[in-house]
Every structure is written in structure tokens, then in C-alpha cells.
Amino acid sequence: MKTGQEPIRLTYYKGVFRLEAHLLVSVSKAYQSRTDYYKQLVRSGIQDKWHKSFPVDDQMAEAILRFLKARCPESVPDFVSDLSQLQAEALASYQTRAAAQLGDYLAALKQGRASLANGAKSKLDQADLLARMSLDIFVSEENNPGRIPLVRFAHRVLQGGRRPLLIYVKGLKYRPSHVQSSFLRRGWGIFRDGHVISLGFNWHYRWPGLIRLAGSRSAPVFKREAAHEFGHTMGLADAYVVWYRSYEAYPGSENYLMHSNRELSPEEIRMMFQAQASGRLQHFPYKWSWEKFRQGFRCELRRRVEKMAENRECKK
């Protein structure tokens, strides 16, 4: 497989990681009258959540270096130099603000204004000492004039050109929005990383999978789901309560993109770099429990049966 065919590319230049995603959005017949509307929602949903500034601590720097050494070795010296400069700037800024706040505090004490002095106390913390870098995302889209998406995809593979990331918008009756690998990559992924999810989603940065989005969602929910599913194609597994985690959520992840579709966290960005370096899906830590799995599976089965019954009632 030639490099450069990947639908998603991640590069580095002067403190900014540029994420380029080339999409092919296909809308089913049920929603075809609003094709442009759904395409715009997909683009804006991904761009809103994946355009981010993040702190670079030791763990983040280590993950970035692993990624650069594996994928962009020519950028390693630039990153090291830029990080040193940004850390020096962060330290100077911290010292300036700390000195200013200390001056305000002492001045207030001299005037005998205790309440003003308390308000002038420094609110800086250790995070202010960290350098910050940016993740910028640029989304391009491939037009699909009358050609079946999979045919266009196969044509690009045979030509050796850049393959698009396939995104299907359709009515999903019994499954939520999800990502899965192409047929040829299913079934054997579990032998790569030992996780059950890899039976259907055998991720690699060259083969990030295809996305299926539920077109019945409201616009805000649809956009958040698009950003979440895009996170899977960047190498991140789920953090919420799901069967392959034995129905156990990752503690402290309530506001994470891969848990509640809210915000891309620094931890998720670090895991993304680890995935892009290793070519393996990154999982939030969990401990398998057969008891939790049985309880969660029964609850989920009950919910699905109730939902199917509701759908039948609505059709009547």
C-alpha cells in the first residue's frame, strides 16, 4: 500500500497539527432531498469538535514524539525546537501574570481592604506553565455524480489515488450511528489487539473504516454524532457504557467526545497520537467482568425489545 492514499492525514508545522480529512458523503433515498443539508452538518460537526488547542505535558509530548518518529520523522527537530520555545513563552507569561497579581494583592493589603486583597490572590495553576499547541482540521469532499460510493472507493484503490472516507447517512432502525471496517478487514482484527470490537472494526490509520450516521437525528445531535464517529476513524474506542467494555464507563470521562459527544479532551488527543503512531485502536482502560456483562446485556436486550414493540405500534 502506497503512503498518501489515506483518507485522513495528520502533519505538523510550527506548533500546529494539521488534520486533513477527505470525505465522500452518501445520503440514502429517504433523505436525498436534503443531501446538501446533511453534507453541511457532517462537515460542521467534525470541524466544530476537532479544531482544538491543547496543553503539552510530558505524556502528551511523548505521544507526539512517538507519532512523529513513526510517521513524520523529518518534523521531529522542528517539534522539539518549537516545544522548547513555547514552554519558555508559557513560563515568562506565567511569571508576568503572577507578579502582577502579587502586586495587586500587596497594594490591597496596604489599603486595609481585605475583601479586595482576597479577590486579587493568584488563581494561576500548574496548567498555566504548560506550552499549548493546536489541532486544526480541514475537510474536503469528493463529489459522487451518479457513481456508487463503494465503486468510487474501489476505483481509487486500484488507481493508487487518495481514498475518501465513506460516510453513509441513512435510516438506522435498530442500531445507533456507528463505524465498521470493510468486509475484507472483518473477523481477524481480534488477533491483532485481543479486543472483541476488532472483529467488526479492525482499525488502522490506512484503513480507518466507514461511518454510518442516523439521518433521523436532530441537527445538533447529528453533528455531535458525526464528530464522535469521526473519533473512531482517528483510532479512539468508546468511553461510555457499551457491551465490549462489559458495560463499564471510563471514570471521569463524562464530558469526553467518546463518551457523551461533548468535547475533545487532552487525553483523547494524546490517545489519538498513540493510535496514529502504532496503527492500533486505543482503548480507555477497563476491567472485564462477566457479571457486569450479563446484567448489562439483559438490560440492553430488554430496551431493544421494547423499542421494537414501540416501532410496531407506531406503524399500526
Image (tube, rainbow, N blue to C red):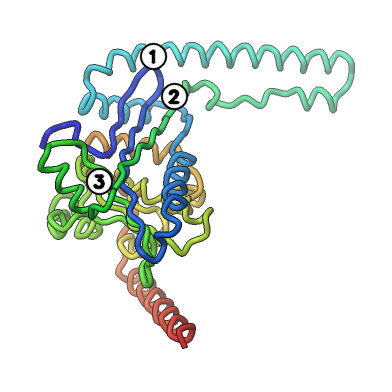
Q: Position of residue 231 (x, y in %)?
A: 36, 46
Q: Please tell me whether residue 77 is drawn above or below residue 48 in the rendered image.
A: above
**Mark 1: which secondary structure?**
helix
**Mark 3: which secondary structure?**
loop
Q: Please tell me whether residue 97 is drawn above or below residue 244 in the rendered image.
A: above
Q: Residue 11 sits in which quadrant?
A: top left
| Circle nearer the N terminus (3, 2) | 2
Quarter of the image where the N terminus is located: top left
Label 1 to label 3: alpha-carbon separation:
30 Å
Q: Classify mark 3: residues with Cα within 10 Å, few (<14), some (14-19) or many (20+).
A: many
Residue, disc 2 = 133
Q: Classify mark 2: residues with Cα within 10 Å, few (<14), some (14-19) or many (20+).
A: some
Q: Disc 3 vs disc 2: which is toward the camera?
A: 3
Identified at 37% across, 53% down, the residue is 238
Q: Position of residue 308 (x, y in %)?
A: 41, 81
Q: Classify mark 1: residues with Cα within 10 Å, few (<14), some (14-19) or many (20+).
A: some
Q: Please tell me whether residue 64 is drawn above or below residue 161 in the rendered image.
A: above
Residue, disc 1 = 82
Residue, disc 3 = 208
Q: Disc 1 vs disc 3: which is toward the camera?
A: 3
The reply to whether discs 1 and 2 touch (Cβ–Cβ < 8 Å) is yes
